[in-house]
């Protein structure tokens, strides 16, 4: 395995296009756990030192550097409490300290800790790609086909309070459902199945599949009742 250490994000982008199949190295919790499967020729581009980690006020929102760890976000009183609660869904402290926000969003696992809460907080991503810097909604990013850009930072445009939940058999098991809502914005991540963004009933668009986290029927039931009171 080769780990490259660019000195700027622009150089990182250039290295990515020169090395097809390469991946960025953020916190490394996901890519380094693949070491056995990546192969000897795998190329990782280390961007961990090039990304901001600050969580700062910007206008009426809060901007979070993509290099901020889930532990930084879990401990932050600047972000809405349901957003910090979501970062705490990563139950292992060592992994929480190592995982970056950018890596978590880029991975876009259907059982993502952060994506539902970020949608509920009306998050806008700043993404640097070979064609320049773009702002996009988190839902746009998740469904985009070409995601070769680097997430630099994420702006939470809404700081209203809300709710975030994660249902799994244990804190370390894969989740059947992660979901969040705030100010009329709802997002669902259904394990092994998909994401839904929009209104309270948006989960109906997901074809819920059976897996170790639970049956499709169970996952759909959870999504249907989770925000009943709200
Ligand atoms: C045992 C275990 C269980 C886990 N369970 C869950 C879970 O239930 N839910 C969940 O959401 N996560 C889970 N994760 C993933 C993890 O904890 C992190 O939250 C995270 O998703 C990866 O962050 P990272 O910074 O370590 O990314 P890395 O491992 O460094 O990179 C992950 C991917 O993101 C890309 N990437 C990294 N940074 C950026 C960036 N700034 N811009 C663009 N692309 C980037 C890389 O190319 C790579 O493909 C689990 C990990 C482990 C080891």
Image (cartoon, rainbow, N blue to C red):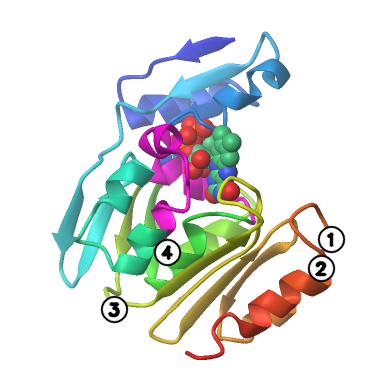
| Mark toward the viewer: 4 or 1 | 1
- At mark 4, the secondary structure is helix
Cα separation between marks 4 and 3: 12 Å
Residue 74 left/right relative to 95: left
Which numbered tag is attached to residue 160? 3
Magenta highlight on residue 100: yes
Residue 164 lies, in percent from the top left, at: 46, 69
Residue 210 left/right relative to 80: right
| Mark toward the viewer: 4 or 2 | 2
The answer to whether 207 is drawn above or below residue 109 in the figure is below
Residue 134 left/right relative to 63: right
Picture residue at 51% right of the left edge, 91% below the top? 229
Residue 185 lies, in percent from the top left, at: 46, 81
Q: Which residue is nearer to you in this view: 172 or 18? A: 172
The answer to whether 228 is drawn above or below residue 10 in the figure is below
Disc 4 or 1, which lies upstream in sequence?
A: 4
- At mark 3, the secondary structure is loop
The answer to whether 93 is drawn above or below residue 34 in the figure is below
Cα separation between marks 1 and 2: 5 Å
Cα separation between marks 2 and 3: 32 Å
Disc 2 or 3, which lies upstream in sequence?
A: 3
Disc 4 or 2, which lies upstream in sequence?
A: 4
Contact (Cβ within 8 Å) of mark 1 with mark 2: yes
Q: Which residue is nearer to you in this view: 172 or 49? A: 172
Label 1 sits on residue? 210
Disc 1 or 2, which lies upstream in sequence?
A: 1
- Region rendered in magenta: 86-110
Disc 4 or 3, which lies upstream in sequence?
A: 4
Label 2 sits on residue? 216
């Amino acid at each position: 395995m080769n780990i490259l250490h660019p000195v700027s994000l622009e150089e990182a982008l250039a290295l990515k296009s020169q090395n097809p199949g390469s991946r960025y190295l953020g916190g490394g919790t996901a890519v380094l756990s693949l070491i056995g499967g990546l192969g000897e020729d795998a190329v990782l581009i280390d961007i961990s030192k090039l990304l901001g980690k600050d969580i700062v006020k910007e206008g009426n929102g809060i901007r979070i550097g993509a290099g901020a760890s889930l532990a930084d976000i879990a401990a932050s009183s600047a972000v809405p409490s349901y957003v910090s609660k979501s970062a705490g869904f990563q139950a292992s402290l060592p992994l929480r300290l190592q995982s970056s926000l950018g890596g978590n969003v880029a991975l876009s696992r259907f059982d993502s800790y952060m994506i539902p809460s970020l949608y509920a907080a009306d998050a806008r991503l700043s993404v640097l790609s070979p064609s320049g810097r773009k702002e996009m909604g988190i839902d746009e990013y998740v469904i985009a086909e070409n995601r070769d850009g680097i997430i630099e930072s994420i702006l939470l445009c809404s700081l209203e309070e809300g709710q975030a939940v994660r249902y799994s058999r244990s804190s370390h098991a894969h989740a059947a459902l992660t979901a969040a809502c705030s100010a009329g914005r709802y997002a669902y991540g259904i394990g092994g199945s998909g994401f839904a963004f929009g209104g309270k009933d948006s989960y109906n668009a997901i074809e819920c599949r059976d897996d170790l986290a639970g049956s499709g029927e169970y996952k759909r039931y959870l999504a249907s009742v989770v925000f009943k009171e709200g």
